[in-house]
């Protein structure tokens, strides 16, 4: 009887220990079973092209424009062009009354003819030493002076014709037929604008100046007009001390004449392009210990926090210099509920 009692006690203790172990194991299994995967949206890091650029606004101006002035006085006899007309360099735009100039030219030409005939006759006599050298030289000077007078009269007549100094379009016509034009109070008769080439001026901050150089590409965006390419034509050699910016001029080919001087535009100047940069969406970026970082999925769909080194930034993507490899999945939505080693479930993949 004494032997049976200790044996029964030992069996009872063993049963209690096994029961306790089973309960502990069940608790661990229950905890593991309750871990829920957090739904996230991801993107896959990939290689692509990205540019270092600067964005601003600008207004288009004509590369060449001219105010057409009259070099002569008189009444406007004829107007040959209207606003919107395309004109070529040297094309006749208007004519002033020129009757006086035509008569003056005819008179000078007649006098030149008379003196030229006299000089021909005098030359024969001078060769035979029938007239003095002084008289002969004096007549030669008179002929030369009259030749200059004829050329001046021709110039005065030409100046009654108002011609286009450049090729372009008539932007404004200020003059009317019958209007008196005076050299004493010169006014513009026409305003011409060249449409085939336009310019846009932007002012780059000092920190962008070292990246800017002639020949770089730019893209201009307009309301209701497709994007247009441009090129940097010149960069000012000095910084404007009052604004801390550098004047940079863009050249726009407008052969199709779809753009007009005075149009407002958004402009992006591309300083440098990397064709094989590693890119992720901007939405993937976080601040980790005051440094940029991303959340990467490992092979078991758990979160790994990665600090990254950034390169160029574009509209919705950013270049990763280090910290992420091509093909790795980064979280772009659902960050708030995540921490290191959180289990996640990918619900969608966002292309970029």
Image (cartoon, grey):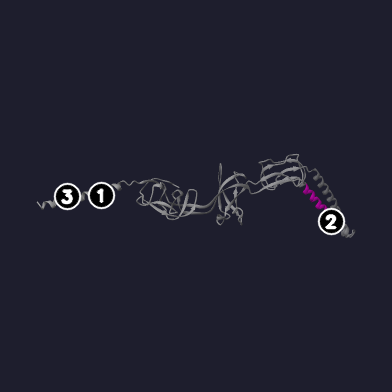
The disc, 2 or 3, on the residue closer to the chain's N-terminal end is 3
Labels 1 & 2 near each other (Cβ < 8 A): no
Q: Disc 1 vs disc 2: which is toward the camera?
A: 1
Counting from the top left corner in percent of width and height, residue 208 is at 55, 54
The numbered disc on residue 12 is: 3
Front position in the image: 164 or 298? 298
Q: Which residue is mark 2?
A: 141
Q: Let me know if residue 324 appears in the view.
A: no
Q: Are marks 3 and 1 in contact (CB under 8 Å)?
A: no
Compute the Cα span from label 2 to label 3: 149 Å
17 left or right of 281 in image: left
Which numbered disc flags the more N-terminal residue, 1 or 2? 1
Residue neighbourhood size for the residue with mark 3, other residues' Cα within 10 Å, grouped as few (<14), some (14–19), many (≥20): few
Q: Quadrant of residue 126?
A: bottom right
Residue drawn at x 74%, y 43% as measured from the top left: 95
Residue 204 x %, y %? 57, 53
Q: Position of residue 81 (x, y in %)?
A: 69, 41
Q: Which residue is mark 1?
A: 24
Q: Distance from label 3 to label 1 (Cα)?
A: 19 Å
Task: Please name whichever residue, 310 or 327, is drawn nearer the observer in this view of the structure.
Answer: 310
Query: Can residue 100 be seen by looking at this rendering?
Result: yes
- The part of the chain drawn in magenta is 143-156
Instruction: Residue 223: name its quadrant.
Output: top right
336 falls in the magenta region: no
């Amino acid at each position: 009887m004494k032997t049976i009692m200790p044996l029964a006690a030992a069996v009872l203790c063993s049963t209690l220990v096994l029961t306790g172990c089973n309960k502990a194991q069940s608790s661990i299994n229950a905890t593991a079973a309750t871990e829920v995967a957090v739904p996230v949206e991801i993107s896959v890091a990939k290689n692509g092209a990205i540019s270092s650029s600067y964005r601003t606004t600008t207004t288009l101006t004509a590369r060449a424009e001219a105010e057409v002035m009259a070099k002569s006085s008189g009444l406007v006899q004829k107007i040959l062009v209207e606003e919107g007309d395309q004109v070529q360099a040297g094309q006749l735009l208007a004519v002033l009354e020129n009757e006086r100039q035509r008569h003056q030219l005819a008179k000078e030409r007649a006098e030149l003819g008379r003196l030229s005939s006299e000089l021909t006759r005098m030359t024969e006599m001078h060769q035979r030493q029938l007239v003095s050298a002084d008289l002969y030289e004096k007549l030669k000077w008179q002929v030369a002076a009259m030749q200059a007078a004829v050329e001046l009269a021709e110039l005065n007549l030409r100046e009654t014709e108002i011609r286009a100094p450049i090729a372009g379009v008539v932007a404004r016509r200020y003059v009317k037929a019958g209007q008196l034009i005076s050299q004493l109070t010169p006014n513009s008769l026409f305003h011409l604008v060249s449409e085939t080439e336009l310019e846009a001026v932007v002012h780059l901050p000092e920190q962008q100046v070292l990246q800017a150089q002639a020949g770089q590409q730019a893209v201009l965006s307009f309301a209701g007009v497709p994007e247009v390419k441009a090129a940097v034509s010149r960069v000012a050699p000095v910084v404007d001390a009052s604004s801390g910016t550098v004047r940079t001029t863009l050249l726009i080919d407008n052969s199709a004449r779809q753009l007009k001087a005075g149009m407002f535009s958004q402009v992006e100047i591309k300083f440098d392009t990397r064709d094989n940069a590693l890119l992720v969406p901007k939405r993937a970026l976080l601040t980790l210990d005051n440094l940029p970082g991303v959340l990467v999925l490992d092979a078991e769909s758990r979160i790994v926090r990665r600090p990254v080194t950034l390169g160029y930034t574009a509209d919705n993507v950013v270049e990763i210099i280090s910290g992420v490899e091509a093909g790795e999945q980064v979280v772009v939505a659902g960050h708030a509920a995540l921490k290191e080693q959180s289990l996640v479930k990918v619900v969608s993949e966002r292309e970029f």
